[in-house]
Image (spheres, rainbow, N blue to C red):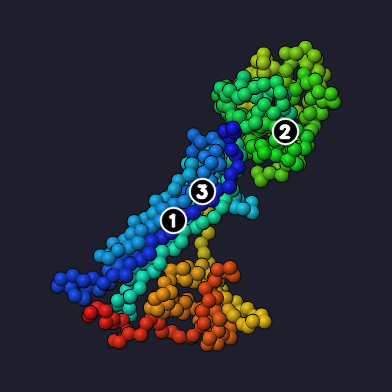
């Protein structure tokens, strides 16, 4: 059974907001106490937080459905409903959050970074909050808004300074075990390493992390073998080290051809972190403890150096040349860190809304069935979700809000007539009205506007 998961589809649902309360104060000596219905509580959020103690997405592989708590409804006596319980999901550093189309929503690379993946719905206002000089005793309250519900893709890309790349059985796992405290599985057959391994290496006063990226073979960038699953772990690494097997017995293979094959796969792979061609490289000619391998390493070193590579001859088994390789890695890591400094805290960019934003649009739609008008916008759609359509006074309050927003004026300019079909919301989930142009609202009352016989019953 696998113990490492680096890609999952997560189904998240934030909590719904609680409904507002309709209540009229009725206490001794206070017969006309007025409305005292409390607001509903907000629904809980679903948030992702980076935790360095988490190393994979295995938890979400076994439990992909996560839901936050709903807000409680308001109560009389101006008591606000309790806020729904939020859910915090801990993810490893290097987690990329994407929607189903592949658009990156958040890139969580540093410890403590947080992203609210689904926001809870706002609680509805109670009738105490809706009271005004014009409507002193509202007989309705607003409904709580539903929380966000969506599917996101979590992808883990290892955050390491150095990536070891090469053919299977080239000695990458042996190298990371010899240079760090990591203890990966090591055997003499291809694809022994099925998960990326991370190790911490110290060279002088420089401490850096090294990732062993498994499964790179010709065709990996097109999905052959295991390469496509783990090439993403190369993207965040700043230095690439080619580990070349100088003692391979496979016909048609040699260190130079292996290097060219892996470089071709890195070039073909289209990652989201930029072109891999500009990453500094080292070449480690491994297994020189074998006499024939040492001779081959001495033979190909001048050719590789002529191509611009820094070459180090090593033996992961005999621990030969590892100190030289470690200091060469550390030098490139220091240069990379100096060129790409890490900010101590993520920068937050706030884009204000335009001052003349109306918050809605009205479109005229015509077909063989007739003419209709569709209203879109966050505010009118939210107001519709908050409305209890079984209460005529609540519907009248919605009409007042839309009129104040300017929807009626826009409908008149587009040629809408009384009785015209008006839709608020998207095509697949719209509320349909027969429009009656008016600026008044509310249920018919027996007294003046703002009074209510219910207070005297």
Helix or strand or loop: what does disc 2 sit on? loop
Name the image quarter holding the N terminus.
top right
Of the two numbered discs 1 and 2 in the rendering, the one whose residue sits closer to the viewer = 1
Instruction: Identify which residue, 277 or 24, lies in the foreground.
Output: 24
Secondary element at image label 3: strand
First-in-chain label (3 vs 1): 1
Mark 2 burial class by Cα count in 10 Å: few <14, some 14-19, many 20+: many
Q: Earlier in the sequence, mark 1 or mark 2?
A: 1
Q: Where is residue 56 drawn, in percent x and y? A: 55, 37
Q: Which residue is identified by label 2?
A: 216
**Residue depicted at 53% across the width and 46% down the height:** 64
Q: Kindly indicate the quadrant of the structure image that contains residue 263.
A: top right
Of the two numbered discs 3 and 2 on the same chain, state the one appearing first in sequence: 3
The residue that label 3 is drawn on is 65
Mark 3 Cα-neighbour bin, 10 Å: few <14, some 14–19, many ≥20: few
Up/down of 20 relative to 305, above or below: below
- Residue at image position (78%, 29%) is 259
């Amino acid at each position: 059974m696998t113990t490492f998961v680096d890609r999952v589809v997560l189904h998240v649902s934030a909590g719904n907001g609680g409904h507002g309360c309709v209540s009229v104060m009725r206490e001794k000596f206070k017969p006309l106490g007025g409305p005292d219905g409390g607001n509903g509580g907000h629904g809980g959020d679903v948030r992702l937080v980076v935790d360095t103690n988490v190393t994979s997405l295995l938890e979400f592989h076994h439990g992909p459905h996560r839901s936050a708590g709903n807000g409680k409804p308001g109560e009389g006596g101006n008591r606000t409903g309790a806020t729904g319980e939020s859910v915090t999901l801990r993810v490893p550093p290097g987690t990329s959050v994407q929607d189903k189309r592949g658009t990156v929503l958040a890139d969580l690379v540093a410890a403590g970074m947080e992203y609210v993946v689904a926001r809870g719905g706002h609680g509805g206002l109670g009738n105490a909050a809706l009271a005004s000089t014009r409507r002193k005793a509202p007989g309705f309250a607003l409904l709580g808004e539903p929380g966000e519900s969506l599917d996101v893709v979590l992808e883990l890309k290892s955050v390491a300074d150095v990536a070891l790349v090469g053919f299977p059985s080239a000695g990458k796992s042996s190298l990371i075990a010899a240079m760090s405290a990591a203890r990966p599985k090591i055997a003499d057959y291809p694809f022994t390493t099925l998960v990326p391994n991370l190790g911490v290496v110290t060279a002088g006063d420089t401490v850096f992390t090294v990732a062993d990226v498994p499964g790179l073979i010709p065709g990996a960038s097109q999905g052959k073998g295991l390469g496509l699953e783990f090439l993403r772990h190369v993207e965040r690494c700043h230095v690439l080290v080619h580990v070349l097997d100088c003692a391979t017995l496979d016909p048609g293979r040699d260190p130079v051809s292996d290097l060219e094959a892996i470089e071709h796969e890195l070039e073909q792979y289209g990652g989201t972190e930029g072109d891999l061609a500009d990453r500094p490289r080292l070449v480690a000619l491994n297994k020189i403890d074998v006499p024939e391998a040492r001779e081959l390493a001495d033979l190909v070193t001048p050719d590789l150096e002529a191509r611009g590579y820094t070459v180090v001859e090593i033996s992961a088994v005999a621990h030969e040349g590892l100190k030289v390789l470690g200091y060469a890695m550390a030098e490139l890591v220091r240069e990379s860190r100096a060129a790409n400094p890490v900010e101590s805290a993520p920068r937050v960019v706030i884009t204000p809304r335009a001052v003349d934003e109306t918050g809605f649009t009205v479109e005229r739609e015509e077909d063989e069935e007739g003419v209709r008008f569709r209203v879109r916008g966050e505010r009118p759609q939210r107001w519709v979700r908050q409305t209890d359509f079984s209460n005529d006074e609540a519907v009248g309050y919605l009409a007042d809000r839309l009129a104040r927003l300017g929807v009626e004026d826009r409908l008149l300019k587009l040629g809408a007539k009384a009785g015209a079909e008006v839709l608020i919301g998207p095509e697949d989930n719209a509320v349909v009205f027969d429009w009656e142009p008016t600026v008044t609202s509310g249920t018919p009352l027996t007294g003046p506007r703002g009074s209510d016989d219910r207070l005297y019953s």
